[in-house]
Amino acid sequence: ESTQGLRPGEPAEGLGWPLSVELGPGLLGGIFDGVQRPLDKIYLESGDHIPRGVVLPALNREKRWHFIPEPQLKSGSDLAAGARLGSVRETASIEHRIQLPPDRSGKLLELAPAGDYRLDDPIGRIRGADGQSHKLKLYHRWPVRNPRPYRRRDNSIVPLITGQRIMDTFFPLIKGGKAAVPGPFGAGKTVVQHQIARWSNADIVIFVGCGERGNELADVLETFPQLQDPLTGRSLMERTLLVANTSNMPVVAREASIYVGITMAEYYRDQGYDVVMLADSTSRWAEALREVSGRLGQMPVEDGYPAYLASRLAAVYERAGRVETQAGESGSITLIGTVSPPGGDFSEPVTAHTKEIIQTFWALSKELADARHYPAIDWVNSFSSHIGVAAEWWHEKVGGKWEQRRARALALLARDAELSRIVNLVGPEALSDAQRWELEGAALIKEGVLQQSALDPIDTFASPEKQYLLLKMMLTIYQKGVELIGLGVPVQELTELPMLDQARRVKQLFNSEQTEKLRELNEEFIQAFEEVRIEYEKFKEQRQ
């Protein structure tokens, strides 16, 4: 709550622990505020507005969960920190693995048999290193500013497949990576987040709405429960957790909300799950830092932000990663933070510091959004530092030459930007046939590969193989055209070929399972260009 109006002499009562969250069954499908108060329960109790002083437990204390203990555990077993005690079926999609808290270890004295238990019911006892007996429950608390421990970092490479071609093919992100999505108002950040939440190959999605407008967060809260998980056919909320902290809520809770979200993400990572955390937006979180530091009387630096802005940002992003957990399983947190730079200025402090920390940068462009090119990710300003390691995965799982084809496509798009400036100055007549074909090739890549409709049932998701075949097809068409222009075929003959329109629509004609048809179509295009070459050679012979 807001601390305005507090003065010396007011009674203050300490809880005895730092700001902590409750971690246990019942988190998934929940909607919490920035300090883990359950907003849906508060709404049922007190209506639309949160009154002062309302405190409700984050997890339901009355609900019974069916606990199944680990069969190999028995009285006298030595348990290390993070050891698995048993499991609970939290939702139809996710099995909740009950573990020993990371700061507890010792000898197991007793473990409850399979049965239904409330969160406060003891399910066992251990004797700790201090010789004391400690009760074990289905949940425990953890301070949000303390990263949860793990054995070691895991350097294995598994890409986060989102099904969005410009992300997966051009600017890939690996599981355990750190990404930023900066963009001005109206550039499509929310739809990008929806697509990642719905289609990414992660087990659990945590969405932290941090200081955004209430209407936008209300839209997320309404649409997420309606989204269907394509993997299970059930509600996406069965593997999703929402932290909602609007711009009119207290700034201290806003500053805490990202820590609350990342701590819950670490909890599921420790169970061996791959978690995606979407933070919207880190700019509003930085503004909360600025407001709190101003109230504390700390010295402001650039744009009024505190001097420790960069280190706090880095500390949050560094809690992402792929790790080997204390229980010996592999889990990951992929952190994707949106940035809302004022006026779309990417040189402001939050965006600048974020670019130094993250590994993948998906820059949204207002110009592309205005031109109805979605996702409006700008291929000029975006980057990914995972190209080298992702290339190994693509080469092994999908097909060779992915890295070379990606580089050729980006070079063609860069050439398109140069030629477009010339066309704007002196018109298309000043270009040679080869240059006009370069523009046509870039348009094929933009419309046939980069543009993607989130509303089209076929085009909304593309498997890695479909993405690879589409890119290969567009580059094949471009290369065959270059060869024909070299023989003297006029560019107008090529641009009027009906196959070009068909190539632009291929992404919406075949789904990710129909890759064989894409290969057949690619061969048909090659054959069509061969027929053009034969006809042109006949025409040249007749002229002679």
Image (cartoon, grey):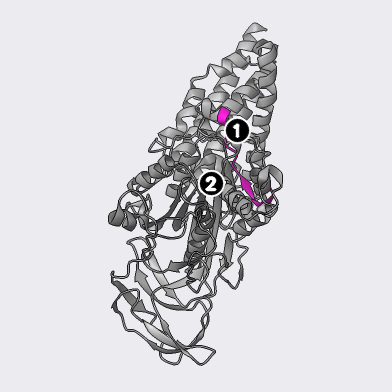
Image position of 488 (left or right of 97)? right
Q: Position of residue 242 (x, y in %)?
A: 42, 54
Task: Kindly identify the amino acid type of the residue bearing the numbered disc 2.
Answer: Ser
Q: Can residue 399 be seen in this view?
A: no
- How many other residues sit within 10 Å of disc 2, few (<14), some (14-19) or many (≥20)? many
Task: Give the image location of residue 498, x and y in percent.
Answer: 48, 20
- Residue located farthest toward the top when viewing the structure as drawn: 543
Question: Any magenta on residue 533?
Answer: no
Write down the region rendered in magenta: 356-367
Tell me the CA gap for discs 2 and 1: 15 Å
Front one among 62 and 77: 62
- Where in the figure is residue 6, as x and y percent of width and height? 51, 58
The number of discs equals 2
**Residue that carries the numbered disc 2 in the rendered image:** 281
Q: Is residue 281 above or below residue 432?
A: below
Q: What element carries label 2?
A: loop
**Above or below: residue 531 compared with residue 84:** above
Type of amino acid under label 1:
Gly
256 or 50, nearer to the observer: 50
Disc 1, SS:
helix
Based on the displayed image, in which of its 4 quarters is residue 63 positioned?
A: bottom left
**Residue labelled with disc 1:** 343
Q: Is residue 190 in view?
A: yes
